[in-house]
Image (tube, rainbow, N blue to C red):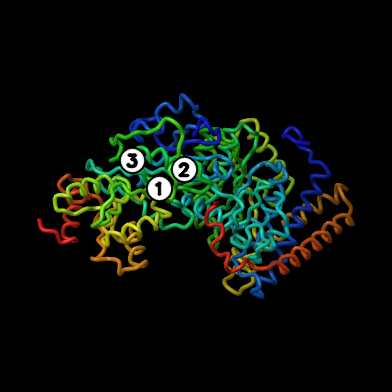
């Protein structure tokens, strides 16, 4: 994108350093210079605001927050300014900016280096929120986010950084608002995003032992949701288990559940289940961590109980 | 007649400053009755008394330069070249307003003249102006960005973050603090230890000045210097303009006319009334024979006509259609 469009800039903490955003931004300064690849002081509010301002002034800005937790300092430019700008100015000027946040869980990093805050952003009118689960989608959704004339929150889970997959060299995009069915099935719909897609796929293959044929949905975009895909799948399977890496209350899983219930609750053979983090801050100690994060065995257990299969 | 090396301000610029201030004042005062009659309902923060800052700074800018405002930005919008009809229609929340009735008085925008927007989140646009300056620097297009904010905004951390980054990258940005001595109801002594706001720029190595914000010529001269430095890659610049608002924080009457609370001492208000920026420049113009009394009177008459016409336009315009509630959430 940067070589095709001179207006694209990357700004944020640690773009010079492999420590923060992995190798994602490595080599960009050599290619595009420090005018367009901007490592910044620790000033999230101002730097995020600067990205928004640059976007208003004709750039396509990507601002990176190497820990999503730090984005809370930037709620004003993200929510008050960028999300509302187009509307409150009667459509006079839109804000092509990408807020790239990295979820950074595990490793005993505790409550302020672990939060998955996508649902908070998805709550806000004017923001789009995407969460890739595969390397292919990471590139394709980022390209779509940069090309979009609206503010897009791009949420990246660091637990996915070891994932391997085919990524074409050429530029392509994955459309915002379109989910993908990663595995077809007929007994239950596992509706997931980002890292939870892989866990759901592992759970699905384990569920085969119980003769449960699970369908795995990758939302890819958290807002706007691919409502069609969700409803069609649930109509087919009659069961919905929503798996999310965020907290339970008012979270993404709650939203997906509500959409299913509001549509036609009679298609359901059993209640909807949410598998999420408990409403508890992230702990440090590994003994607590292992009980905190959602992994595939937890999904298997919940589905088995729901479907009522014999163990 | 540009550049700090030319301290003389031309006759045209001087009468231009006068005209801009009169247009702003006349327009501001025209909102008082419709506000009291509840015809205008959105919160309106009048800038009567502070016109010299908007006029002085914007007259030092080119159309392509960027400005960002705040909750009290009618003056900035008009001074930068925004249309008065669209301003009045927006304050009346009509479809023909500059923000199509979606923003009201606190959201004024006209990108075609570099008025990039205004918001009521205190200090909310400081970093946006910073980003516009960054864009100008990356493109090397010689544009300058101006951020207008009040003394209240000095309590926000984003100001210091932005001062630092602007200085670090020598961005073409002028930070203009309109110090009207009150942060809504609080006098400045209750929100800051140091009353010298301009000193905020100094630790970041920025050129920083405090000037009489009620003297349009002084503001223009200082702004011209600041803008020229920015254009030569020698930004940023911090400009504190001492001024005073003649109305309450919001609406025509609170804090002054007694319907709410008279928190400002009447003597203080009177003192500042004598420093009225329009009268001050008017005296200068007459004393120096820059224009005649008749010519000044014509400026007032023209402004009255323009304002009347703008009100007619606004009142004759429809409100946004109910079914269009959901327009403009995204740019698709």
Residue visible at 31% across and 51% down? Answer: A217
List x then y, in percent, for residue A300.
18, 52
List x then y, in percent, for residue A176.
44, 48
List x then y, in percent, for residue A11.
46, 37
Looking at the rendered structure, whether the residues under marks 1 and 3 are on a common chain is answered as yes
Question: Please, is residue B266 above or below residue B236 in the view?
Answer: below
Asked if disc 2 and disc 1 are in contact, CB closer than 8 Å, the reply is: yes
Q: Image check: A105 left or right of A73? A: left
User: Could you tell which of marks 3 and 2 lies nearer the N-terminus?
Assistant: 3
Q: Which residue is mark 1?
A: A130
Q: Which residue is mark 2?
A: A144
Q: Image check: B302 left or right of A110? A: right
Residue visible at 58% across and 33% down? Answer: B137
Q: Which residue is mark 3?
A: A134
Q: Nearer the viewer, residue B72 or A231?
A: A231
Residue A280 visible in the current orientation: no
Question: Please, is residue A293 above or below residue A235 in the view?
Answer: above
CA neighbours of label 1 inside 10 A, class few (<14), some (14 to 19), many (20+): many
User: Which secondary structure, mark 2?
Assistant: helix
Question: Please, is residue A142 above or below residue A258 in the view?
Answer: above
CA neighbours of label 3 inside 10 A, class few (<14), some (14 to 19), many (20+): many
Q: Nearer the viewer, residue B206 or B309?
A: B309
CA neighbours of label 2 inside 10 A, class few (<14), some (14 to 19), many (20+): some
* Disc 2/disc 1 C-alpha distance (Å): 10 Å
Q: Which numbered tag is attached to residue A284?
A: none
Residue B261 visible in the current orientation: yes
């Amino acid at each position: 994108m940067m070589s095709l469009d001179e207006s694209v800039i990357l700004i944020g903490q640690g773009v010079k350093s492999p420590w923060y955003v992995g190798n994602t931004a490595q080599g960009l300064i050599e290619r595009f210079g420090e005018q367009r690849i901007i490592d910044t002081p620790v000033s999230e509010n101002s730097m995020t605001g600067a990205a928004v301002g640059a976007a208003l002034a004709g750039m396509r800005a990507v601002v990176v927050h190497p820990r999503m937790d730090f984005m809370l300092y930037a709620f004003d430019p993200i929510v008050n300014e960028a999300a509302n700008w187009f509307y409150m100015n009667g459509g006079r000027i839109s804000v092509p900016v990408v807020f790239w946040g990295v979820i950074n869980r595990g490793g005993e990093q505790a409550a302020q280096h672990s939060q998955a805050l996508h649902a908070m952003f998805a709550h806000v009118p004017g923001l789009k929120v995407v969460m890739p689960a595969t390397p292919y989608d990471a590139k394709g959704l980022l390209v779509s986010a940069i090309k979009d004339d609206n503010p897009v929150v791009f949420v990246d889970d660091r637990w996915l950084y070891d994932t391997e997959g085919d990524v074409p060299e050429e530029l392509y995009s994955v459309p915002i608002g379109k989910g993908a069915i990663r595995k077809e099935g007929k007994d239950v719909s596992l509706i997931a995003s980002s890292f939870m897609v892989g866990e759901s796929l592992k759970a699905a293959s384990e569920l085969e032992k119980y003769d449960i044929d699970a369908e795995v949905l990758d939302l890819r975009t958290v807002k706007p949701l691919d409502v069609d895909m969700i409803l069609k799948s649930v109509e087919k399977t009659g069961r919905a288990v929503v798996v999310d890496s965020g907290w339970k209350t008012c979270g993404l899983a709650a939203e997906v559940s509500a959409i299913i219930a509001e549509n036609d609750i009679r298609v359901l053979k059993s209640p909807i289940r949410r598998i999420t983090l408990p409403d508890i801050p992230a702990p440090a100690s590994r003994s607590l961590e292992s009980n905190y994060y959602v992994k595939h065995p937890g999904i298997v257990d919940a589905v088995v109980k729901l479907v009522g299969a014999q163990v | 007649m540009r550049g700090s090396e030319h301290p003389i301000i031309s006759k045209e610029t001087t009468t231009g400053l006068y005209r801009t201030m009169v247009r702003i004042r006349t327009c501001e005062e025209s909102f008082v009755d419709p506000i009291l009659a509840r015809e205008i309902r959105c919160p309106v923060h009048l800038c009567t008394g502070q016109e010299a800052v908007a006029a002085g700074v914007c007259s030092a800018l080119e159309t392509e330069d960027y400005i960002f405002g705040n909750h009290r930005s009618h003056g900035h919008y008009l001074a930068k070249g925004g249309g008065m009809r669209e301003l009045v229609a927006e304050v009346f929340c009509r479809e023909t307003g500059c923000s199509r009735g979606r923003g009201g008085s606190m959201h004024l925008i006209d990108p075609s003249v570099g008025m990039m927007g205004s918001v009521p989140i205190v200090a909310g646009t400081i970093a946006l102006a910073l980003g516009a300056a960054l864009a100008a620097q990356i493109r090397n297009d010689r544009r300058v960005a101006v951020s207008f904010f009040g003394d209240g905004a000095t309590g926000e951390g984003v100001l210091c973050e932005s001062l630092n980054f602007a200085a670090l990258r020598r961005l073409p940005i002028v930070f203009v603090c309109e110090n009207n001595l009150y942060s809504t109801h609080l006098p400045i002594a209750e929100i800051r230890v140091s009353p010298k706001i301009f000193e905020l720029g100094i630790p970041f190595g920025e050129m920083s000045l405090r000037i009489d914000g009620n003297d349009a010529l002084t503001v223009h001269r200082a702004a011209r210097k600041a803008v020229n430095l920015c254009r030569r890659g020698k930004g940023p610049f911090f400009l504190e303009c001492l001024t005073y608002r003649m109305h309450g924080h919001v609406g025509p009457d609170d804090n002054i006319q007694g319907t709410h609370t008279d928190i400002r001492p009447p003597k203080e208000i009177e003192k500042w009334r004598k420093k009225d920026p329009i009268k001050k420049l008017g005296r200068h113009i007459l004393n120096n024979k820059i224009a005649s009394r008749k010519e000044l009177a014509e400026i007032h008459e023209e402004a009255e006509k323009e304002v009347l016409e703008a009100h007619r336009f606004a009142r004759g315009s429809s409100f946004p259609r109910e079914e269009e509630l959901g327009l403009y959430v995204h740019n698709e």
